[in-house]
Image (spheres, rainbow, N blue to C red):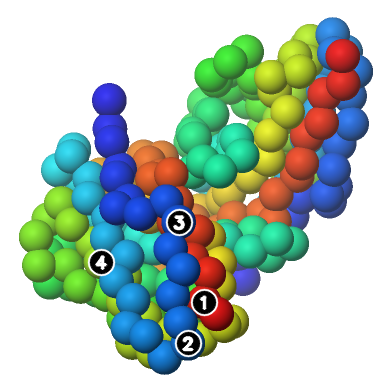
Amino acid sequence: AQSVAQPEDQVNVAEGNPLTVKCTYSVSGNPYLFWYVQYPNRGLQFLLKYITGDNLVKGSYGFEAEFNKSQTSFHLKKPSALVSDSALYFCAVRDPYYGGSQGNLIFGKGTKLSVKP
Amino acid sequence: DVKVTQSSRYLVKRTGEKVFLECVQDMDHENMFWYRQDPGLGLRLIYFSYDVKMKEKGDIPEGYSVSREKKERFSLILESASTNQTSMYLCASRPGQTNSPLHFGNGTRLTVT
């Protein structure tokens, strides 16, 4: 069965420090992986995706993520955190082998990122 | 830029009422989705639609129905609202290509009293 896990409910970082938000996944084939961000009282915004190719993908607002097939991980990173990065972050996975309802995105439970000045 | 518009940001309804949540997208996307978001549970898929008049159940369809009469509009219906349906409801759309990201509306926070 497909699944995605975000092992940390909350991550606290000081402004200017690097940040990492962790995500691990389980699919039977090669995954499609996504990161989304949600600011308070808003919908989710797409940050970046991995479909194929280079393991390091770059996205919006200076974020990047590294696909690691052996560790089945897709951690979100940023070299220098901003207070404005404080938000809820969701990792999502899709197994392109499946169609229909099994082919939909599976979301993690979310990680709250708090960046302090 | 893709826009997904949900008609209400906040709704308060009484138990037993019939509730309609409306969602419109302006990019001619084939696929549309309804999720509910609850703290600690993440996003759970209620229903989705691949095309006009087509619908499929997601992970938690009980107590909900949907309607897609036009390509741009996807409605979520609570036939008889209950307090356990108090939640944030998110609509999303994407093109037919399965590697495309979802585009979300800003959500409707529904409270059932």
Asked if both marks, 2 and 3, belong to the same chain, the answer given is yes
Q: Determine the CA span between mark 4 and mark 2.
A: 20 Å
Q: Which mark is residue B10?
A: 3
* Amino acid type at image mark 1: Val
Q: Is residue B99 above or below residue B110?
A: above
- Residue B56 in sight here: no
Mark 1 lies on residue = B112
Mark 1: which secondary structure? strand
Q: What residue lies at 37% left-to-right and 85% top-to-bottom?
A: B17
Q: Earlier in the sequence, mark 3 or mark 1?
A: 3
Of all residues, the one furthest to the left in this rendering is B70
Q: Which of the two residues, B12 or A50, is positioned nearer the viewer here? A: B12
Q: Are discs 2 and 3 less than 8 Å apart at CB?
A: no
In the picture provided, is A113 more to the left or to the right than A55? right
Q: Earlier in the sequence, mark 4 or mark 2?
A: 2
Q: Determine the CA span between mark 2 and mark 3.
A: 16 Å
Mark 4: which secondary structure? strand
Q: What residue lies at 62% left-to-right and 71% top-to-bottom?
A: A1
Is disc 1 surrounded by few (<14), some (14 to 19) or many (20+) residues within 10 Å? some
1 vs 4, front mark: 1
Mark 2 lies on residue = B15
